[in-house]
């Protein structure tokens, strides 16, 4: 253990002496945080949320209500609604919300009686759906106010009990930037330097010391894990101090989210180690890292929400290790993490960690290959 701690300390000291590595690990994510908050932090739309509207009354009054509702939904800037009027059965079955105006809507208005509308939430939970329900309720209340002293003319059912706290874009962005740090540190900041050190002959001195290979590799991984956790903490502190980002989950949920972050970091560090073990040059390692980094950066649900993709594409991307990890971390920070929802993420990241370490152990060498 003493040898491991000495190696971790030495590797951290070497990392902290590199100004370029410090910039890309700590300063660049903070700059991205400021830029993304300035561009999207206030006006980003959640969604899209599909709304199927079924008008069983077919009266002038029901059409007027629907017209006012859709005008209001187009003018708001919180949720990206995709309304579908008089949908087919299959379209209604796939919609996120189904709003049904029952028969007798016009007759109820004529006698001053309230009409209970049916609103079914078919798919999903979270910030977009909570905000969507609030908007539908708000525009119905505004429609009621046209009658002033008259009784309410429409009423929506109460929302279902929320299973978790709201995830706004600011918390979404901070967690996504933590994922970006994991990618950059594990690939660009780990695989490439390892190959450069091996091909430059720096690893030969480790063979002079009486210690197992696994201790040296573990020390490198632990030092990078500490760096990722420190960079993530710095971003959360900056987001809290500057933009007022808050985490409303309890301590157990936050600890589970941090544990998932650490597990994901270990899995991607093992991937970086595998790339270093299987490539013979810095150029080859850099090429493989770029082939993985940029596709994962844009498809990993990090800074740009993937809600606009087709459902089949979103379901396929959710199966990737990075996307599964980010979903679990966000559920932890909003109080919705549990074994039933996150066992897949844990199993997938553990399988990735074990497989990459096993393959790396077979290919790892201290001597240059060129």
Image: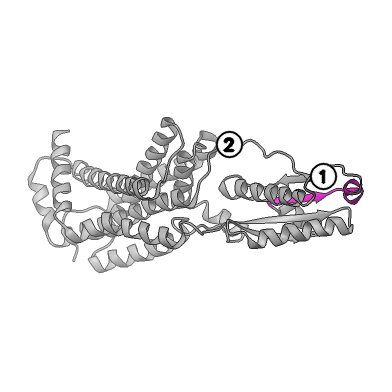
Residue 297 disc label? none
Q: Position of residue 173 (x, y in %)?
A: 43, 53
Residue 187 at x, y percent in the picture:
31, 57
Q: Percent position (x, y) of residue 111?
A: 91, 45
Q: Is residue 285 above or below residue 114?
A: below
The answer to which of 357 and 144 lies nearer the viewer is 144
Mark 2–mark 1 distance (CA, rounded to whole Å):
36 Å
Circle 2 or circle 1, nearest the eye: 1
- What segment carries the magenta color? 96-109
Q: Is residue 364 visible?
A: yes
User: In the shown orientation, is residue 240 left or right of residue 50?
Assistant: left
The 10 Å Cα crowd at callout 2, few under 14, some 14 to 19, many 20 or more, is few
Q: Which mark is residue 163?
A: 2
Q: Quadrant of the C terminus?
A: bottom left
| Secondary structure at numbered mark 1 | loop
Residue 98 part of the magenta segment = yes
**Foreground pick, 144 / 282:** 144
**Colour logic:** one colour
Name the N-terminal-most of marks 2 and 1: 1
Q: Residue at x 30, y 51 (%)?
A: 360
**292 shown above or below 233:** below
> From where the camera sits, is residue 358 visible?
no
The tally of labels here is 2
Q: Is residue 176 left or right of residue 361?
A: right
Q: Mark 1 = which residue? A: 150
């Amino acid at each position: 253990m003493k040898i491991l701690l000495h190696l971790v300390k030495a590797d951290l000291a070497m990392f902290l002496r590199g100004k370029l590595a410090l910039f890309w690990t700590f300063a660049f994510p903070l700059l991205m945080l400021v830029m993304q908050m300035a561009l999207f932090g206030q006006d980003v739309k959640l969604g899209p949320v599909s709304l199927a509207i079924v008008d069983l009354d077919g009266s002038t009054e029901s059409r007027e209500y629907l017209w006012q509702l859709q005008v209001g939904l187009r003018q708001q800037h919180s949720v990206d609604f995709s309304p579908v009027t008089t949908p087919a059965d299959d379209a209604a079955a796939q919609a996120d919300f189904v709003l049904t105006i029952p028969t007798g809507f016009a007759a109820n208005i004529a006698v001053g009686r309230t009409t209970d509308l049916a609103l079914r939430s078919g798919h999903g939970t979270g910030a977009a759906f909570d905000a969507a329900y609030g908007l539908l309720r708000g525009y119905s209340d505004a429609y009621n106010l046209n009658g002033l002293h008259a009784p309410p003319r429409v009423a929506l059912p109460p929302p279902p009990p929320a299973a978790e706290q709201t995830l706004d874009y600011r918390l979404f962005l901070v967690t996504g930037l933590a994922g970006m740090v994991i990618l950059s540190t594990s690939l660009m900041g780990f695989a490439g330097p390892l190959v450069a050190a091996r091909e430059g002959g720096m690893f030969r001195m480790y063979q002079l010391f009486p210690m197992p290979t696994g201790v040296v590799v573990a020390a490198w991984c632990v030092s990078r894990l500490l760096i990722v956790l420190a960079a993530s903490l710095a971003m959360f502190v900056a987001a809290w101090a500057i933009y007022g980002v808050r985490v409303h989950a309890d301590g157990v949920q936050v600890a589970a989210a941090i544990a998932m972050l650490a597990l994901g970091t270990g899995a991607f560090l093992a991937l970086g180690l595998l790339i270093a073990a299987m490539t013979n040059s810095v150029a080859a390692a850099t090429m493989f890292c770029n082939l993985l980094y940029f596709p994962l950066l844009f498809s990993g649900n990090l800074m740009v929400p993937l809600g606009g993709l087709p459902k089949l594409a979103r379901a396929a991307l959710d199966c990737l290790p990075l996307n599964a990890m980010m979903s679990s971390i966000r559920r932890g920070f909003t109080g919705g993490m549990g074994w039933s929802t996150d066992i897949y993420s844990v199993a997938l990241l553990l399988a990735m960690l074990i497989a990459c370490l096993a393959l790396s152990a077979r290919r790892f060498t201290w001597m240059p290959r060129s």
